[in-house]
Amino acid sequence: MDENESPAVVVDGVSKRYGDVVALDGLSLTVGRGELFGFLGANGAGKTTTIKLLTGQRTPDEGSVSVLGRDPSADPVETRRHLGVLPEREDPPSFMTPREYFAFVGRVRDIDDETLAARIDGWTTRFAFREQLDTLCTDLSRGQRQKVMITASFLHEPDLVFIDEPLANLDPVMQERLKRFLVEYTREDNTVFLSTHHIDVAEEICTRVGILRDGRLAEDRRPASDDDDDERLLDAFLDGVAVQ
Ligand SMILES: Nc1ncnc2c1ncn2[C@@H]1O[C@H](COP(=O)(O)OP(=O)(O)OP(=O)(O)O)[C@@H](O)[C@H]1O
């Protein structure tokens, strides 16, 4: 299959252990191009592990993964050129300003100066942080640092973006703007793989949702809309969890 026709993400029978801990146990999952895929699961369910496998930071013990038709561990640097990644709990370099950090990202991702300037302008407008562009990242608030990280992960407008809990630390207005952006971005046939605990957000914006449980995909479905009788996502999530 041509790389441009292959699904955005394929996980095929993947198992991953850390010592005695079984993080993934025969996980299979396919995400098509243009989907806004919500990846849900309890703490420790294996969401971050899955993203690490898909971004070439780990290799499966069994099974295989492919992103955009490529094996990410075979050539992680080349694969990453086509991906955006917003890792959980990561900050921009404390010793750089956002402008310097974006210039660095622009250089390694081959973005020309004019395009880079236009994209930075778009993101600083969307997230209202133009005035912080020349402040050292160490002096930014947590939400401001999160805005910088989100901007950096989308700067090269990759075909596929993995974002882990992107709404963390954003105020409600910024959350709304990011949600709208994600919907628009995937309408242009880009794919977003959104790992989150915000079930309401997944229900609101995702085109498909997977719930990870016991290292496998327990649910793979469209979110319920207000006018249908499908089980709500929260109920589907709670079905597999012993609530005390
Ligand atoms: N480097 C590691 N060494 C040992 N165990 C690990 C390591 N990374 C993850 N694990 C274990 O693997 C399991 C899956 O962890 P993972 O971080 O993938 O879960 P998660 O779904 O992202 O959780 P959360 O929602 O809490 O972020 C957990 O039991 C975790 O303790």
Image (cartoon, grey):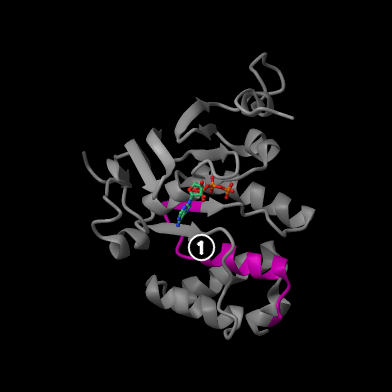
Which quadrant of the rendered structure holds the C terminus?
A: top right
- Answer above or below: position of 153 versus 130: above
Residue 33 visible in the picture: no
Is 123 magenta? The answer is no
Query: Looking at the picture, how far across and down is residue 3, in whole percent?
Result: 26, 46
Q: Nearer the viewer, residue 215 or 177?
A: 215
| Quadrant that contains the N terminus | top left
The residue lying at 59 percent from left, 70 percent from top is: 91
Which of 77/112 is in front? 77
In the image, 117: left or right of 72?
Answer: right
Residue 187 at what x, y percent from top left?
A: 52, 42
Q: Is residue 119 visible?
A: yes
How many tags in the picture?
1
Q: Is residue 156 magenta?
A: yes
Question: Which residue ends up furthest to the left in the rendered image?
Answer: 1
Where, by quadrant of the figure, is residue 23 drawn? top left
Residue most extreme to the top: 229
Q: Does the closest atom of ligand 1 sit within 8 Å of the Cβ of label 1? A: no
Q: Say which element carries label 1.
A: helix
Mark 1 = which residue?
Answer: 153
Q: Which segment is the magenta one? A: 139-162
Locate residue 224 relative to residue 164 in the image: left or right. Answer: right
